[in-house]
Amino acid sequence: MAMTITLPHCGASREYFRTQQCERPSMPQDQYQQANYVYQYGSTKKAVFGGVRAAFGMPILALGASYLGLGSLVRDSDLSIWFGVFSTFTTWALPGQLAMLELYGTGASLVVIAVTVSLVNARFLPMMINVMPVIRHPSVPTWKYYLSAHLLSINSWAYLVQRGPLMPHEERFPYYIGFALTIWIAGMVCAALGFLLAGVVPRPVSLGLVFLNPIYFMLLIILGIKKPAIAFATLIGAVMGPLLHLVSPDWGLMATGVIAGSLGFFLGRIWERRQGNNGSASHG
Amino acid sequence: MVDQIMTEYWPWLLALVTGLVTLKWRVLGVYFSGQLETTSPVFDWVSCVAYALIAGLVTRMIILPIGTLQETSSEARLTGAAIALLIFFAARRSVLMGTFAGVGLFIAMTWQT
Protein backbone atom coordinates (compact mmCIF):
# COMPACT_ATOMS: atom_id res chain seq x y z
CA MET A 1 0.00 0.00 0.00
CA ALA A 2 2.79 2.37 0.94
CA MET A 3 4.30 1.98 -2.52
CA THR A 4 1.26 3.48 -4.20
CA ILE A 5 2.34 7.10 -4.23
CA THR A 6 5.97 6.59 -5.07
CA LEU A 7 5.52 5.32 -8.63
CA PRO A 8 5.33 8.22 -11.06
CA HIS A 9 3.20 6.47 -13.70
CA CYS A 10 0.58 5.50 -11.17
CA GLY A 11 -0.87 8.93 -10.86
CA ALA A 12 -4.49 9.08 -9.92
CA SER A 13 -6.29 5.76 -9.87
CA ARG A 14 -7.58 5.78 -13.41
CA GLU A 15 -8.28 2.11 -13.46
CA TYR A 16 -8.39 0.03 -10.39
CA PHE A 17 -6.60 -3.00 -11.82
CA ARG A 18 -3.87 -0.81 -13.21
CA THR A 19 -3.52 0.83 -9.85
CA GLN A 20 -3.29 -2.55 -8.22
CA GLN A 21 -0.49 -3.42 -10.59
CA CYS A 22 1.39 -0.38 -9.39
CA GLU A 23 0.96 -1.27 -5.78
CA ARG A 24 3.37 -4.16 -5.78
CA PRO A 25 6.06 -3.29 -8.30
CA SER A 26 8.55 -5.72 -6.84
CA MET A 27 6.68 -8.68 -8.27
CA PRO A 28 7.20 -9.70 -11.89
CA GLN A 29 4.12 -8.54 -13.75
CA ASP A 30 3.14 -11.93 -15.18
CA GLN A 31 3.35 -13.66 -11.90
CA TYR A 32 1.50 -10.83 -10.25
CA GLN A 33 -1.36 -10.98 -12.74
CA GLN A 34 -1.61 -14.75 -12.46
CA ALA A 35 -2.00 -14.40 -8.75
CA ASN A 36 -4.60 -11.69 -9.11
CA TYR A 37 -7.17 -13.04 -11.56
CA VAL A 38 -10.37 -13.49 -9.70
CA TYR A 39 -11.82 -15.34 -12.67
CA GLN A 40 -9.52 -17.65 -14.59
CA TYR A 41 -10.82 -20.56 -16.61
CA GLY A 42 -7.74 -22.00 -18.29
CA SER A 43 -9.02 -22.44 -21.86
CA THR A 44 -11.35 -20.81 -24.36
CA LYS A 45 -13.90 -23.58 -23.97
CA LYS A 46 -13.83 -23.35 -20.19
CA ALA A 47 -14.19 -19.57 -20.42
CA VAL A 48 -17.35 -20.03 -22.53
CA PHE A 49 -18.77 -22.31 -19.87
CA GLY A 50 -17.63 -19.87 -17.22
CA GLY A 51 -19.84 -17.30 -18.90
CA VAL A 52 -22.73 -19.76 -19.12
CA ARG A 53 -22.39 -20.53 -15.42
CA ALA A 54 -22.28 -16.84 -14.52
CA ALA A 55 -25.52 -16.35 -16.48
CA PHE A 56 -27.30 -19.00 -14.41
CA GLY A 57 -28.06 -17.15 -11.25
CA MET A 58 -29.05 -13.54 -10.84
CA PRO A 59 -28.83 -12.57 -14.56
CA ILE A 60 -31.24 -15.29 -15.74
CA LEU A 61 -33.45 -14.86 -12.71
CA ALA A 62 -33.81 -11.10 -13.24
CA LEU A 63 -33.95 -11.12 -17.04
CA GLY A 64 -36.18 -14.19 -17.05
CA ALA A 65 -38.64 -12.43 -14.76
CA SER A 66 -38.56 -9.28 -16.89
CA TYR A 67 -39.19 -11.27 -20.07
CA LEU A 68 -42.05 -13.15 -18.40
CA GLY A 69 -43.51 -9.68 -18.00
CA LEU A 70 -42.94 -8.93 -21.68
CA GLY A 71 -44.60 -12.22 -22.66
CA SER A 72 -47.72 -11.34 -20.71
CA LEU A 73 -47.81 -7.91 -22.35
CA VAL A 74 -47.61 -9.58 -25.76
CA ARG A 75 -50.74 -11.56 -24.91
CA ASP A 76 -52.44 -8.37 -23.65
CA SER A 77 -51.73 -6.80 -27.04
CA ASP A 78 -53.54 -9.70 -28.81
CA LEU A 79 -50.37 -10.86 -30.55
CA SER A 80 -49.20 -14.45 -30.96
CA ILE A 81 -46.80 -16.27 -28.64
CA TRP A 82 -44.18 -16.30 -31.40
CA PHE A 83 -44.25 -12.54 -31.62
CA GLY A 84 -42.65 -12.16 -28.17
CA VAL A 85 -40.00 -14.72 -29.08
CA PHE A 86 -39.35 -13.12 -32.49
CA SER A 87 -39.12 -9.61 -31.04
CA THR A 88 -36.66 -10.83 -28.40
CA PHE A 89 -34.67 -12.55 -31.15
CA THR A 90 -34.48 -9.47 -33.36
CA THR A 91 -34.24 -6.66 -30.79
CA TRP A 92 -32.91 -8.12 -27.52
CA ALA A 93 -33.39 -4.90 -25.57
CA LEU A 94 -36.29 -4.79 -23.16
CA PRO A 95 -36.95 -1.02 -22.94
CA GLY A 96 -37.05 -0.83 -26.75
CA GLN A 97 -39.34 -3.84 -27.01
CA LEU A 98 -41.70 -2.37 -24.42
CA ALA A 99 -41.77 0.95 -26.30
CA MET A 100 -42.51 -0.89 -29.55
CA LEU A 101 -45.43 -2.82 -28.02
CA GLU A 102 -46.78 0.37 -26.51
CA LEU A 103 -46.61 2.28 -29.79
CA TYR A 104 -48.09 -0.68 -31.69
CA GLY A 105 -51.04 -0.49 -29.31
CA THR A 106 -51.56 3.19 -30.02
CA GLY A 107 -51.38 2.60 -33.78
CA ALA A 108 -48.27 4.71 -34.38
CA SER A 109 -46.66 4.75 -37.83
CA LEU A 110 -43.60 2.73 -38.76
CA VAL A 111 -41.39 5.81 -38.92
CA VAL A 112 -42.43 7.01 -35.45
CA ILE A 113 -41.82 3.55 -33.99
CA ALA A 114 -38.44 3.17 -35.72
CA VAL A 115 -37.20 6.59 -34.55
CA THR A 116 -38.47 6.17 -30.97
CA VAL A 117 -36.98 2.70 -30.53
CA SER A 118 -33.75 3.85 -32.11
CA LEU A 119 -33.46 6.67 -29.57
CA VAL A 120 -34.44 4.46 -26.63
CA ASN A 121 -31.74 1.97 -27.63
CA ALA A 122 -29.04 4.49 -28.52
CA ARG A 123 -27.31 3.53 -25.27
CA PHE A 124 -25.81 0.56 -27.12
CA LEU A 125 -23.41 2.86 -28.95
CA PRO A 126 -21.48 4.10 -25.88
CA MET A 127 -21.90 0.71 -24.20
CA MET A 128 -20.35 -1.09 -27.15
CA ILE A 129 -17.49 1.41 -27.48
CA ASN A 130 -16.99 0.96 -23.75
CA VAL A 131 -16.91 -2.81 -23.76
CA MET A 132 -14.82 -3.37 -26.91
CA PRO A 133 -11.40 -2.44 -25.43
CA VAL A 134 -12.14 -4.84 -22.56
CA ILE A 135 -12.91 -7.87 -24.76
CA ARG A 136 -10.77 -7.13 -27.82
CA HIS A 137 -7.93 -9.62 -28.24
CA PRO A 138 -5.56 -10.29 -31.19
CA SER A 139 -6.66 -13.94 -31.34
CA VAL A 140 -10.24 -12.98 -32.22
CA PRO A 141 -10.93 -11.99 -35.87
CA THR A 142 -12.80 -8.71 -36.30
CA TRP A 143 -15.85 -10.27 -38.00
CA LYS A 144 -16.59 -12.16 -34.80
CA TYR A 145 -17.10 -8.90 -32.94
CA TYR A 146 -19.55 -7.73 -35.60
CA LEU A 147 -21.37 -11.05 -35.60
CA SER A 148 -21.68 -11.11 -31.81
CA ALA A 149 -22.51 -7.39 -31.47
CA HIS A 150 -26.22 -8.23 -31.43
CA LEU A 151 -25.77 -10.08 -28.13
CA LEU A 152 -24.79 -7.01 -26.12
CA SER A 153 -27.27 -6.02 -23.42
CA ILE A 154 -27.11 -4.03 -20.19
CA ASN A 155 -26.52 -7.29 -18.35
CA SER A 156 -23.58 -8.51 -20.42
CA TRP A 157 -22.13 -5.00 -20.52
CA ALA A 158 -22.28 -4.70 -16.71
CA TYR A 159 -20.76 -8.14 -16.21
CA LEU A 160 -17.96 -7.50 -18.68
CA VAL A 161 -16.89 -4.08 -17.44
CA GLN A 162 -16.93 -5.42 -13.88
CA ARG A 163 -15.47 -8.90 -14.29
CA GLY A 164 -13.61 -8.61 -17.59
CA PRO A 165 -10.59 -6.81 -16.08
CA LEU A 166 -10.38 -9.54 -13.44
CA MET A 167 -9.83 -12.35 -15.97
CA PRO A 168 -7.06 -13.10 -18.50
CA HIS A 169 -7.53 -11.01 -21.63
CA GLU A 170 -7.92 -13.94 -24.03
CA GLU A 171 -10.71 -15.44 -21.92
CA ARG A 172 -12.95 -12.35 -21.94
CA PHE A 173 -14.45 -12.74 -25.43
CA PRO A 174 -15.39 -16.42 -25.02
CA TYR A 175 -16.78 -15.59 -21.56
CA TYR A 176 -18.91 -12.86 -23.13
CA ILE A 177 -20.22 -15.23 -25.81
CA GLY A 178 -21.13 -17.90 -23.26
CA PHE A 179 -22.82 -15.40 -20.98
CA ALA A 180 -24.67 -13.34 -23.59
CA LEU A 181 -25.86 -16.30 -25.67
CA THR A 182 -27.27 -18.00 -22.57
CA ILE A 183 -29.29 -15.03 -21.37
CA TRP A 184 -30.49 -14.30 -24.93
CA ILE A 185 -31.91 -17.83 -25.24
CA ALA A 186 -33.33 -17.60 -21.71
CA GLY A 187 -34.98 -14.31 -22.68
CA MET A 188 -36.72 -15.93 -25.66
CA VAL A 189 -37.85 -18.95 -23.61
CA CYS A 190 -39.22 -16.66 -20.88
CA ALA A 191 -41.03 -14.44 -23.39
CA ALA A 192 -42.92 -17.58 -24.49
CA LEU A 193 -43.46 -18.74 -20.88
CA GLY A 194 -44.76 -15.31 -19.90
CA PHE A 195 -47.32 -15.51 -22.70
CA LEU A 196 -48.53 -18.90 -21.43
CA LEU A 197 -48.61 -17.71 -17.80
CA ALA A 198 -50.44 -14.45 -18.55
CA GLY A 199 -53.87 -14.58 -17.00
CA VAL A 200 -52.76 -17.27 -14.55
CA VAL A 201 -50.59 -14.79 -12.65
CA PRO A 202 -52.38 -11.97 -10.79
CA ARG A 203 -52.00 -8.50 -12.27
CA PRO A 204 -49.83 -7.02 -9.44
CA VAL A 205 -47.33 -9.85 -9.94
CA SER A 206 -46.99 -9.29 -13.68
CA LEU A 207 -46.61 -5.56 -13.02
CA GLY A 208 -43.94 -6.49 -10.45
CA LEU A 209 -42.11 -8.44 -13.14
CA VAL A 210 -42.01 -5.36 -15.36
CA PHE A 211 -40.88 -3.25 -12.39
CA LEU A 212 -38.08 -5.71 -11.63
CA ASN A 213 -36.19 -4.62 -14.73
CA PRO A 214 -35.28 -1.04 -13.69
CA ILE A 215 -34.66 -2.08 -10.06
CA TYR A 216 -32.24 -4.83 -11.08
CA PHE A 217 -30.39 -2.53 -13.48
CA MET A 218 -30.19 0.18 -10.81
CA LEU A 219 -28.42 -2.15 -8.37
CA LEU A 220 -26.27 -3.71 -11.09
CA ILE A 221 -25.02 -0.27 -12.04
CA ILE A 222 -24.27 0.80 -8.48
CA LEU A 223 -22.31 -2.44 -8.09
CA GLY A 224 -20.17 -1.42 -11.06
CA ILE A 225 -19.13 2.00 -9.74
CA LYS A 226 -15.42 1.83 -9.04
CA LYS A 227 -14.13 5.28 -9.96
CA PRO A 228 -15.16 8.74 -8.73
CA ALA A 229 -15.89 9.91 -12.30
CA ILE A 230 -18.35 7.03 -12.81
CA ALA A 231 -20.00 7.77 -9.46
CA PHE A 232 -20.49 11.42 -10.43
CA ALA A 233 -21.77 10.51 -13.90
CA THR A 234 -24.24 7.97 -12.48
CA LEU A 235 -25.58 10.36 -9.85
CA ILE A 236 -25.98 13.29 -12.22
CA GLY A 237 -27.47 11.02 -14.88
CA ALA A 238 -30.00 9.61 -12.41
CA VAL A 239 -31.21 13.13 -11.58
CA MET A 240 -31.11 14.46 -15.14
CA GLY A 241 -32.82 11.48 -16.80
CA PRO A 242 -36.40 12.20 -15.71
CA LEU A 243 -35.90 15.99 -15.93
CA LEU A 244 -34.65 15.97 -19.51
CA HIS A 245 -37.34 13.43 -20.41
CA LEU A 246 -39.87 16.11 -19.47
CA VAL A 247 -38.07 18.58 -21.72
CA SER A 248 -37.87 16.21 -24.67
CA PRO A 249 -39.12 12.61 -24.54
CA ASP A 250 -37.22 11.85 -27.76
CA TRP A 251 -33.80 13.33 -27.11
CA GLY A 252 -33.82 13.53 -23.29
CA LEU A 253 -32.02 10.26 -22.75
CA MET A 254 -29.25 10.93 -25.27
CA ALA A 255 -28.72 14.41 -23.85
CA THR A 256 -28.60 12.96 -20.33
CA GLY A 257 -25.87 10.55 -21.35
CA VAL A 258 -23.68 13.14 -23.03
CA ILE A 259 -24.18 16.01 -20.53
CA ALA A 260 -24.16 14.00 -17.29
CA GLY A 261 -21.40 11.75 -18.60
CA SER A 262 -19.16 14.69 -19.52
CA LEU A 263 -19.86 16.46 -16.22
CA GLY A 264 -19.03 13.29 -14.31
CA PHE A 265 -15.86 12.82 -16.34
CA PHE A 266 -14.59 16.33 -15.57
CA LEU A 267 -15.67 16.27 -11.92
CA GLY A 268 -13.83 12.97 -11.61
CA ARG A 269 -10.66 14.54 -13.01
CA ILE A 270 -10.91 17.48 -10.59
CA TRP A 271 -11.57 15.09 -7.71
CA GLU A 272 -8.56 12.95 -8.53
CA ARG A 273 -6.31 15.96 -8.94
CA ARG A 274 -7.39 17.21 -5.50
CA GLN A 275 -6.72 13.80 -4.00
CA GLY A 276 -3.32 13.86 -5.69
CA ASN A 277 -2.50 17.26 -4.19
CA ASN A 278 -3.45 15.99 -0.76
CA GLY A 279 -0.71 13.44 -1.07
CA SER A 280 -2.71 10.31 -1.63
CA ALA A 281 -2.51 9.51 -5.30
CA SER A 282 -4.48 6.35 -4.97
CA HIS A 283 -7.39 5.19 -2.93
CA GLY A 284 -5.91 1.65 -3.28
CA MET B 1 -56.51 -8.24 -49.84
CA VAL B 2 -53.50 -5.98 -49.45
CA ASP B 3 -55.02 -4.59 -46.26
CA GLN B 4 -55.48 -8.05 -44.85
CA ILE B 5 -51.89 -9.00 -45.56
CA MET B 6 -50.71 -5.75 -44.04
CA THR B 7 -52.64 -6.26 -40.78
CA GLU B 8 -51.31 -9.77 -40.53
CA TYR B 9 -47.68 -8.94 -41.16
CA TRP B 10 -47.62 -5.44 -39.65
CA PRO B 11 -46.48 -6.44 -36.12
CA TRP B 12 -43.81 -8.76 -37.55
CA LEU B 13 -42.51 -5.98 -39.76
CA LEU B 14 -42.39 -3.73 -36.67
CA ALA B 15 -40.39 -6.32 -34.73
CA LEU B 16 -37.96 -6.63 -37.62
CA VAL B 17 -37.50 -2.88 -38.04
CA THR B 18 -37.18 -2.42 -34.25
CA GLY B 19 -34.44 -5.04 -34.30
CA LEU B 20 -32.58 -3.46 -37.18
CA VAL B 21 -32.54 0.07 -35.72
CA THR B 22 -31.24 -1.42 -32.46
CA LEU B 23 -28.58 -3.57 -34.14
CA LYS B 24 -27.31 -0.50 -35.95
CA TRP B 25 -26.06 1.03 -32.66
CA ARG B 26 -24.29 -2.14 -31.60
CA VAL B 27 -22.54 -2.51 -34.95
CA LEU B 28 -21.56 1.18 -35.02
CA GLY B 29 -20.18 0.74 -31.51
CA VAL B 30 -17.84 -2.04 -32.69
CA TYR B 31 -16.84 0.12 -35.65
CA PHE B 32 -16.16 3.29 -33.64
CA SER B 33 -14.31 1.51 -30.86
CA GLY B 34 -11.42 1.23 -33.35
CA GLN B 35 -8.16 0.83 -31.55
CA LEU B 36 -9.40 2.46 -28.36
CA GLU B 37 -7.58 1.17 -25.28
CA THR B 38 -8.91 0.89 -21.73
CA THR B 39 -6.12 3.22 -20.60
CA SER B 40 -7.28 6.07 -22.85
CA PRO B 41 -9.15 9.09 -21.41
CA VAL B 42 -11.67 8.67 -24.25
CA PHE B 43 -12.48 5.25 -22.81
CA ASP B 44 -13.09 6.85 -19.40
CA TRP B 45 -15.35 9.44 -20.97
CA VAL B 46 -17.39 6.86 -22.89
CA SER B 47 -17.74 4.84 -19.66
CA CYS B 48 -19.14 7.94 -17.97
CA VAL B 49 -21.60 8.52 -20.82
CA ALA B 50 -22.75 4.87 -20.72
CA TYR B 51 -23.27 4.92 -16.96
CA ALA B 52 -25.06 8.28 -17.03
CA LEU B 53 -27.34 7.12 -19.86
CA ILE B 54 -28.40 3.95 -18.08
CA ALA B 55 -28.78 5.71 -14.72
CA GLY B 56 -31.03 8.24 -16.47
CA LEU B 57 -33.02 5.49 -18.16
CA VAL B 58 -33.49 3.64 -14.86
CA THR B 59 -34.75 6.64 -12.87
CA ARG B 60 -36.96 7.65 -15.81
CA MET B 61 -38.48 4.14 -15.87
CA ILE B 62 -39.15 4.35 -12.12
CA ILE B 63 -40.35 7.95 -11.84
CA LEU B 64 -41.96 8.54 -15.25
CA PRO B 65 -42.76 5.08 -16.66
CA ILE B 66 -44.02 4.60 -20.19
CA GLY B 67 -46.62 1.88 -20.65
CA THR B 68 -48.10 -0.59 -18.17
CA LEU B 69 -46.23 0.70 -15.12
CA GLN B 70 -48.21 3.92 -15.51
CA GLU B 71 -51.17 2.18 -13.90
CA THR B 72 -49.17 1.66 -10.68
CA SER B 73 -48.84 4.35 -8.00
CA SER B 74 -45.65 6.38 -7.85
CA GLU B 75 -45.55 5.75 -4.07
CA ALA B 76 -45.29 2.01 -4.71
CA ARG B 77 -42.54 2.52 -7.29
CA LEU B 78 -40.51 4.99 -5.22
CA THR B 79 -40.87 3.02 -1.97
CA GLY B 80 -39.91 -0.16 -3.83
CA ALA B 81 -36.82 1.51 -5.27
CA ALA B 82 -35.82 2.99 -1.87
CA ILE B 83 -36.18 -0.36 -0.09
CA ALA B 84 -34.24 -2.08 -2.86
CA LEU B 85 -31.37 0.37 -2.30
CA LEU B 86 -31.56 0.05 1.47
CA ILE B 87 -31.53 -3.76 1.50
CA PHE B 88 -28.84 -3.81 -1.21
CA PHE B 89 -26.43 -1.85 0.98
CA ALA B 90 -27.55 -3.48 4.25
CA ALA B 91 -26.96 -6.93 2.77
CA ARG B 92 -23.39 -6.08 1.72
CA ARG B 93 -24.27 -5.03 -1.80
CA SER B 94 -26.40 -8.05 -2.63
CA VAL B 95 -28.22 -7.46 -5.93
CA LEU B 96 -30.42 -10.50 -5.32
CA MET B 97 -31.64 -9.40 -1.88
CA GLY B 98 -32.11 -5.78 -2.93
CA THR B 99 -34.06 -6.64 -6.09
CA PHE B 100 -36.40 -9.09 -4.41
CA ALA B 101 -37.04 -6.88 -1.38
CA GLY B 102 -37.85 -3.88 -3.61
CA VAL B 103 -40.02 -5.80 -6.07
CA GLY B 104 -41.72 -7.73 -3.27
CA LEU B 105 -42.75 -4.54 -1.52
CA PHE B 106 -43.87 -3.03 -4.82
CA ILE B 107 -46.12 -6.04 -5.53
CA ALA B 108 -47.56 -5.89 -1.99
CA MET B 109 -48.31 -2.18 -2.31
CA THR B 110 -49.83 -2.62 -5.77
CA TRP B 111 -52.01 -5.46 -4.50
CA GLN B 112 -53.60 -3.23 -1.89
CA THR B 113 -54.81 -0.63 -4.34
Image (tube, rainbow, N blue to C red):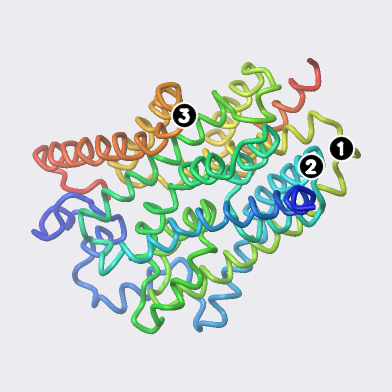
For mark 2, give the secondary structure. helix
In the image, residue A203 sits, relative to residue A58, either above or below, namely: above
Earlier residue among tags 1 and 2: 2
Instruction: Identify the disc placed on residue A201.
Output: 1
For discs 1 and 2, the disc positioned in front in the rendered view: 2
Closer to the camera: disc 2 or disc 3?
3
> Residue A81: where, in percent of width, then height?
81, 53
Which residue lies under the disc numbered 3? Answer: A249
* Inter-mark Cα distance, 1 to 2: 9 Å
N-terminal label among 3 and 1: 1
Disc 3 marks a residue whose amino acid type is: Pro
Amino acid carrying label 1: it is Val
Circles 3, 1 touching at the beta carbon (< 8 Å): no
**Residue named by callout 2:** A72
Q: Are marks 2 and 3 on the same chain?
A: yes
Secondary structure category for the residue under label 3: loop
Chain name for mark 2: A
Mark 3 and mark 1: span between their CA atoms?
A: 32 Å
Query: How crowded is the residue under tag 1: few (<14 C-alpha within 10 Å), some, or many (20+)?
Result: few
Chain letter for mark 3, please.
Answer: A
Q: Residue at x 79, y 42 (%)?
A: A72
Q: Is residue B45 left or right of residue A127?
A: left
Q: How many marks?
A: 3
Identify which residue, A49 or A151, lies in the foreground. A151
Q: Position of residue A35 (x, y in %)?
A: 38, 72
